[in-house]
Structures are given as C-alpha cells and as structure tokens.
Amino acid sequence: MKLIYQLTILSLFTFFATSVNAQETLKRGDKIEKVDIRDLNNKPAVTPGIGEKVTLIFYPDPDKPSMNEYFIEEVKKWKFPEDEYIAYGIVNLADSPFPNSVIRFMTRQVRKRSKQEADALILTDPKRFIQDAWNTGDCNNAFSILLVDAEGTVLFWKADEMTEEEVDFVINEIRNNVSTSHKYTEEEMKQFELSK
C-alpha cells in the first residue's frame, strides 16, 4: 500500500512539474519586450521592432543553418511595408561549440549570397539572452522562428522544423497584420540575383 501511495505522489508531482514547465514556455498570445543582445561585431544592440512593427525573427543555432530553408525561401517571395514590418536574424551563439568570432565572420559572409540578403540585419545572442527573457525553452540544434504583432504579442513560435502548413500560416499571419502585401513574380525575383 505504501508503494502505491508513493507512486501516486510521484506521478502527481511529475504531472504538475510538467504542466508548470509547459506553461512557462513561450506560446501564441504571450507578450514579449525588447532584449539587449549583440550585433555582428559584438557591440551592444537591442531587438528592433518589438512593440512597434510586425516582427519576424529567425533564431538559428549555427549547427542547423538550413533547418527552415524552405520557410526562408518562401517568405523572401513577399514584400511587406517597411514601416509596418521588420524581419531579421539573431544567431544563437551560446548553443554552438564553434568560437563566436568564427560564427560572426561566417554569418557576415552569408550576406553575400544575394542582393536581398546583403542588407539583412543579423544580430547575435552569445549568452541565451533571448531564451531567458522570452522563456523560449531549449533552442539547441534548432532554427527557431518567432512572429509577433505590432504590440509585441506572439503570433507564432517554433523551435524546430516548420511544416508546409506552418509556413503558409506564418506568411498569412504577416499578411493579415500589415496593410498591404505583394508576392514577387519570378521576373521580379531576378532583381535580387547576383550578376555572374
């Protein structure tokens, strides 16, 4: 009887601990604030757009650079008003075994892949500032995607590979939260290619 009682107590403790932990993780409807992080030169920076614009943040572990490549390619096909929307990357340096200076250098090189990426804003998170401030949970080995509205309310968060349905959902959420949107034609997309 004592063993059954102990197992019941242990089960209840595990259930409540899991429930509390799940509630603490970032989810749709949560509000977030700006966070102090670093730029690509390791200078102080602040997460722009939060509470001001619809904000799309790419938060990759450098070990998984292509995890959500399909989403990146799909969202690049859309033009949204710059006064209402911002998108940028924050490289999760803390979860990578590589030296921060090497990752910063390689990240600067990525911007040379296309004209569209040349001016991309890329920041860095060397000490899990984002994970701690926004209660994201574990982001190791993940290319995480965060979308918030102009008030800083979370519309979408995922620290894993997105499904095609989630890709469509996020793009539609952006479109629903800005005044205009335009999907580039194939001809228009050629303007972003680097001349050979």
Image: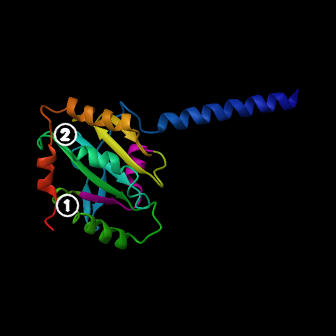
- Residue at horizontal 15%, vertical 50%? 189
Residue 30 higher or lower than 127, as above or below: above
* Type of the residue with mark 2: Lys
* Type of the residue with mark 1: Ser
Label 1, on which residue? 114
Residue 141 higher or lower than 107, as above or below: above
Q: Is residue 154 left or right of residue 95?
A: left
- Residue at horizontal 29%, vertical 54%? 89
Decide which of 164, 110 is in the foreground and name it. Answer: 164
Decide which of 73, 61 is in the foreground and name it. Answer: 73
Q: Is residue 106 visible?
A: yes
Q: Is residue 171 left or right of residue 2?
A: left
Asked if residue 123 is among those painted magenta in the image, a careful observer would answer yes
- Please identify the quarter of the rendering in which residue 5 is found: top right
Q: Which mark is residue 37?
A: none
Tell me if mark 1 has few (under 14), some (14-19) or many (20+) residues whose alpha carbon lies within 10 angstroms of its own: some
Q: Position of residue 22 (x, y in %)?
A: 52, 35
Identify the image quadrant of the N terminus: top right
Q: Position of residue 154 (x, y in %)?
A: 33, 35
Span of residues in magenta: 122-136
- Please identify the quarter of the rendering in which residue 18 is found: top right
Q: Is residue 100 left or right of residue 97?
A: left
Q: Position of residue 36 (x, y in %)?
A: 30, 54
Q: Which mark is residue 53?
A: 2
Q: Position of residue 128 (x, y in %)?
A: 41, 55
SS at mark 1? loop
